[in-house]
Image (cartoon, grey):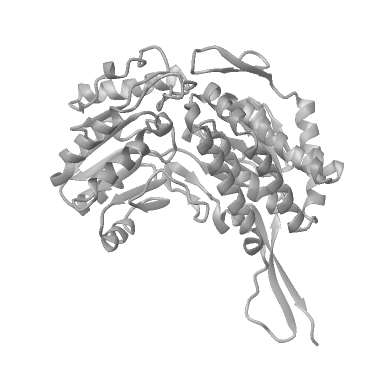
Amino acid sequence: MTQNLVEIISPIDGSIYATRPLSEAAQVETSLAKATNAQALWQATPLETRAAFVLQALDIIDQQRREIALELAWQMGRPLRYGDGEVNGFLERGRHMVAIAESALQNLYPAPQAGFERYIERRPLGVVLVIAAWNYPYLIAVNSIVPALMAGNCVVLKHSGQTLLSGERLAAAFQTAAKQLGLSPALQDGLISCLTLDHKATAQIIADPRIAHVNFTGSVSGGHAIVAAAKDRFIGLGLELGGKDPAYVRADADLGATAEALVDGSFFNSGQSCCGIERIYAEASVHDELVERMVALTQDYVLGDPLDEATTLGPMVRTQAADMVRQQISDAVAQGAKPHLEESTFAASQSGTPYLAPQILTQVTHAMEVMRAESFGPVVGIMAVENDAEAIAKMNDSVFGLTASVWTQDTQAAKAIGAKLRTGTFFMNRCDYLDPGLAWTGIGDTGRGASLSQIGYEQLTRPMSFHLKTGT
């Protein structure tokens, strides 16, 4: 970032893909004023109209798949062949949250009481600030934008500087939908806006009394900065931060299916996923075979230019991120870890670039940073354990708690293990997936709050109780 200008540096070749000026104070003020004005109208708008508006915007994004895939490749390095996946997930989550809005927002009625009418309404909060991350720029944003709008809030979107074009495209789709449906000019202008902000301006807008809630997805340090910016305000903060998600492979697991899923969960998106697999524990009797299967599958990846349809593993978002993962791997090997993949197998992998070969490490311990700190890159450590109890202890030995998975054919054993884990989502025979029908949440340094499902609506509304004496 240069003074008053944000540059999107493409991981493909290090070129400047696009530049955008930072939003000036007057633009920020205009956005907040329009959002505040529109919100009063929007909360009085029937739910059916809100649904039609959101679904229209989702359809507009659906029609832009090719452009989106290309922009994602240039902005954050995801292979072109996977562009449809993000749009599909975006639509799945958005349409689900529209479908459940009526039931999620309906009044709650306690037991009848003679002479009184009593109920609880779910009221909108006001203007919601959504701060979205770059690694899944549409999937992350939709988790907050759709339920916020459906609940009667207005949205100010601040997207990552790495994926500013995604933020602009999202805001434009909703603005176009408002025009196509003939919503009032005030709603067209104020339902959603997109601002380009630096850290200082973001803190200032969080402190503004017109912001009623903040949803942030990003790093742990970023989460602390959000909390600090809101320290003098009694507003809700949804914080989805780091992860070090574990998987446990029991002796009765289907090793073929398990290895395939864990390789994908570890390395898809170049490992840049909050809920990606970063550490694996396998019962000793199946450890070696699991490693052998995973290594063989990983060797089939094609690391290279994400614009090439043959590429299945793109560059990391920036050289600095790749260098951090390289250092984790190097330090682990120096402490006794065994690497199972030769970097030379992946010709595009080069030091000093974002192109990094995937790596599987064994003989790792929790004394190594690669098994403790978030890697957010294409590396996974695998440890042998003797039994469920040891696996549970290892899985819980983390400051994070987003997801955890167990791979087994014994459902009852899986449930018993899941009940003892410190995690927001527990999977059996699945990983690296977000079900919009379930709450997306975590504990520890993973953050606070929840998105999606009915619980996601509870985070974006406030309860208001009505207590009416109707009798004498």
Question: Which residue is at a point 23% across and 51% down the rendered structure image?
Answer: 253
Question: Which residue is at a point 20% across and 53% down the rendered structure image?
Answer: 252
The image quadrant of residue 31 is top right
- Pick whichever, 208 or 12, lies toward us: 12
* x and y percentages locating residue 104 in the rendered image: 62, 61
* x and y percentages locating residue 124 in the rendered image: 71, 54
> Extreme right residue here?
185
The quarter of the rendered structure image containing the N terminus is: top right
Q: Is residue 374 left or right of residue 79?
A: left
Question: Which residue is at a point 56% across and 45% down the rendered structure image?
Answer: 238
Is there any visible trace of residue 147 in the rendered image? yes
The image quadrant of residue 350 is top left
- Pick whichever, 71 or 414, lies toward us: 71
Is there any visible trace of residue 217 in the rendered image? no
The image quadrant of residue 158 is top right
Q: Is residue 112 left or right of residue 363?
A: right
Question: Which residue is at a point 42% across and 45% down the rendered structure image?
Answer: 402
Q: Is residue 469 left or right of residue 327?
A: right
**Number of marks:** 0
Above or below: residue 231 compared with residue 195: below
* x and y percentages locating residue 107 in the rendered image: 68, 68
* x and y percentages locating residue 331 in the rendered image: 26, 22
